[in-house]
Image (cartoon, helix red, strand yellow):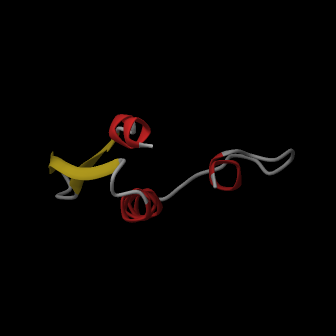
Amino acid sequence: MFSKLLTQKQGQGLTALFHSDIELMMDSLQHDFPEIVKVSSIGKSFEGRPIKVMEVDAREALLSS
C-alpha cells in the first residue's frame, strides 16, 4: 500500500493525498489492526475539522505471539 499510494514513479510528478484519503487510511488501519493501531482526535483545526492522531504500538502483539 505504501509504494502504491505514497511513492512516485518516474515521470509521474508529485504524489499527493487529500485530507479525506489520509483519514480513510487511518480508519482502515485501525479497523484492520485494532490491537496495534489507535486513532483519536486531539482537537479541531481552525477550519473545524478534527485533528486526528494515530498511535501505533505493537508491543503487546509481539509479546503475546
Is 38 positioned to the left or the right of 24 in the image? Answer: left
The relative height of residue 26 versus residue 14 in the rendered view (above or below) is below
Give percent across and percent down for residue 52.
Answer: 26, 50
Residue in the picture at 18% in, 51% down: 41
> Observer-nearest residue: 9 or 46?
9
Residue in the picture at 68% in, 46% down: 14
Give percent across and percent down for residue 34.
Answer: 34, 58
Give percent across and percent down for residue 18.
Answer: 48, 59
Q: Quadrant of the C terminus?
A: top left
Give percent across and percent down for residue 56.
Answer: 37, 40
Residue in the picture at 22% in, 58% down: 49
**Residue 52 in view:** yes
Q: Quadrant of residue 10?
A: top right
Outermost residue to the front: 65
**Residue 44 in view:** no
Total marks in image: 0
Outermost residue to the left: 43
Residue in the picture at 16% in, 45% down: 42
The relative height of residue 28 versus residue 61 in the rendered view (above or below) is below
Q: Quadrant of the N terminus?
A: bottom right
> Observer-nearest residue: 5 or 55?
55
